[in-house]
Amino acid sequence: MVEKMVRDFAGKEIAPRIKDLDRAQTFDRNILKQMAELGILGICVPEKYGGGGMDYISLGLACEELEYVDTSLRVILSVHVALNSLTLLTWGSEEQKQKYLVPQAKGEKIATYALTEPNAGSDAVGIQTYAKLEGDRYILNGEKMWISLADVADNFITFAWTDREKQKKRDHSGMSAFIVERGMKGLNTATIHGKLGIRAGNTGSISFSDVEVPRENLLGKEGEGFKIAMFAIDQGRYTVAAGATGLVRACLDASVKYAHERQAFGVEIGHHQLIKEMIAGMARDYDAARLLWMRAGWLKNQGMRNTRETALAKWFACDASERAAADAVQIHGAYGYSDEYPAERFYRNCKGAVIYEGAREIQKLLHGDYALGYRKDKPLRCSLPSWPFE
């Protein structure tokens, strides 16, 4: 039912307009309202906090169906639900959940996650943003970059050093997490233009200039920021994996359709073996990617540690989407180079996912450490409530 609901919404409401939105590099804020009305923005948040109370497979299916139409749609769930709301659900105080999580789950407020900076991406410990406690508030200064929904969101989970000495030593226990609201004096956002892909989505920068953040907006405890950031990324990578799987399927369907329409050397190009090889690869990768993200989702449903499985799903699915998009352009030939067909948009959109939420190279290093036994997951100090929600 979830799959059909999201597929119908994306297919009927967004698909007919997505080419124009992509060409205009315009984010349609009305999409957020439509998602809120369907309950997508709180899909796997417990009902007691205003959400749909569904499981993580449902979240994954929603992400797959949204990215099947366009990556910009899935990004909304990645930052609003996975990176922000699920992090609040696990790490937030009851007061924070009532103030921030409930309106986010209902879609009354839009949220995002701000970790990346101009000189710090995969190296999260390299951030320079600093928060100094003065009385009952933290004074926040710094800059964030490449933040999805930066110019749209109402609430931001952001990260800053609170211990200068630990920052000098690159000791991540000196980093803390904060809930920041739009409208706080000194907070400014701007949209980034000229992106390669995801042009129908909003991506921007955030600057903090002596932003006064109430002490009660500290998320978790002081010094837990890095752990919170990594927890959030586990959730974000899951949605990216499911979404990239949807992109593989979109490439497959578009390529099959074109292979039946186009003729060369007197027959449909689908009869040519090298075209078959590319389409077969997409079909193989789609099935494998779907099984990988569903395994991660099953572990989440059980409340079990899933860092390795989620990262593997993200790594494989994103690489698969890059292969599928490149082959889709090749199958479409010269038309694959034109935005009259969706293949070129898929090709532009797929590239972001092999960079954000931990670049491909980070995934390789992580899984090399697992395979060599250099890295072993410790039991979670916190976990999402297992399905069904308590």
Image: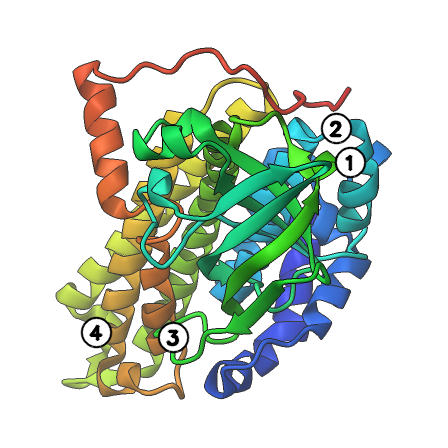
Kindly identify the amino acid type of the residue bearing the numbered disc 4: Gln
User: Tag 4's secondary structure?
Assistant: helix
Q: Earlier in the sequence, mark 3 or mark 4?
A: 3
Q: Which residue: 35% across, 27% down? A: 171
Location of residue 176 in the rendering, given as x and y in whole percent from the top left corner: 53, 34
Q: Which residue: 41% across, 77% down? A: 342
- According to the picture, the residue beneath numbered tag 4 turns out to be 330
Comparing labels 2 and 4, the label whose residue is closer to the camera: 2
- According to the picture, the residue beneath numbered tag 2 turns out to be 93
Kindly identify the amino acid type of the residue bearing the numbered disc 2: Ser
Q: Is residue 13 above or below residue 153?
A: below
Q: Spatial distance from mark 2 to mark 1, Cα to Cα?
A: 6 Å
Find out whether the residues at labels 2 and 1 contact each other: C-beta distance under 8 Å.
yes
Q: In this view of the protein, can residue 66 be seen by the observer?
A: no
In the picture, the quarter occupied by the C terminus is: top right
Q: What sort of colour scheme is used for the picture?
A: rainbow
Q: Is residue 220 left or right of residue 321?
A: right
Q: Spatial distance from mark 1 to mark 3, Cα to Cα?
A: 34 Å
